[in-house]
Amino acid sequence: MTRLESDMEVQTNTSFRQWLGTMEPWQWAQKFDKGFRYGQMTTNLVEGINAMLLKTRHISISSIFLAIFYRLATLMLRMGQQQVNQMEAGHVFVEDVRDAMVVNC
């Protein structure tokens, strides 16, 4: 903490401790988060990628990159075709947005 504080003071005019003092401890320290992850929007994405790569953990890194590439290429083709189908049907918004608009109306 001391090293981090001194590094931050070199880069900024305000004290790191003062800056942290403006926030609640559960917002910046895992010790106080009571099992929640504050402000992390990537958790589900990372878990999804881990689930996708579960079968590739035993192979080389170059093979893992190839697996990611081919899985994403397949996904992009499928999602792209869905978007083309929706545009050809005359829809301006994707299905999830249309559903949300109906619910909110």
Image (cartoon, rainbow, N blue to C red):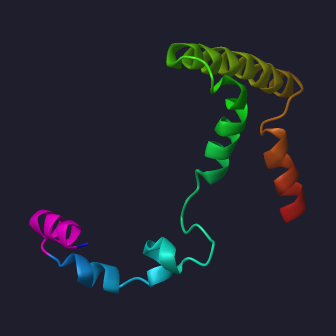
8 inside magenta stretch? yes
In the rendered image, the quadrant that contains the N terminus is bottom left
Left or right: where 23 falls relative to 85: left
Q: Residue lying farthest front? A: 58
Residue 105, horizontal then vertical, whole percent:
87, 64
The quarter holding residue 19 reads bottom left
Residue 35 within the segment the image draws in magenta: no
Q: Residue at x 18, y 79 (%)?
A: 15
- The span picked out in magenta is 2-13
Residue in the image at 85% along x and 28% along y: 86
Q: Locate residue 4 relative to residue 85 in the image: left or right.
A: left
- Position of 76 relative to 7 (above/below): above
Q: Quadrant of residue 69?
A: top right
- The vertical placement of 96 against 33, above or below, is above
Tell me which corner region of the image, top left, top right, bottom left or bottom right, holds residue 5: bottom left
Position of 68 compared to 28: left or right? right
Residue at (82%, 45%) from the top-left corner? 96
Relative depth, front residue between 104 and 42: 42
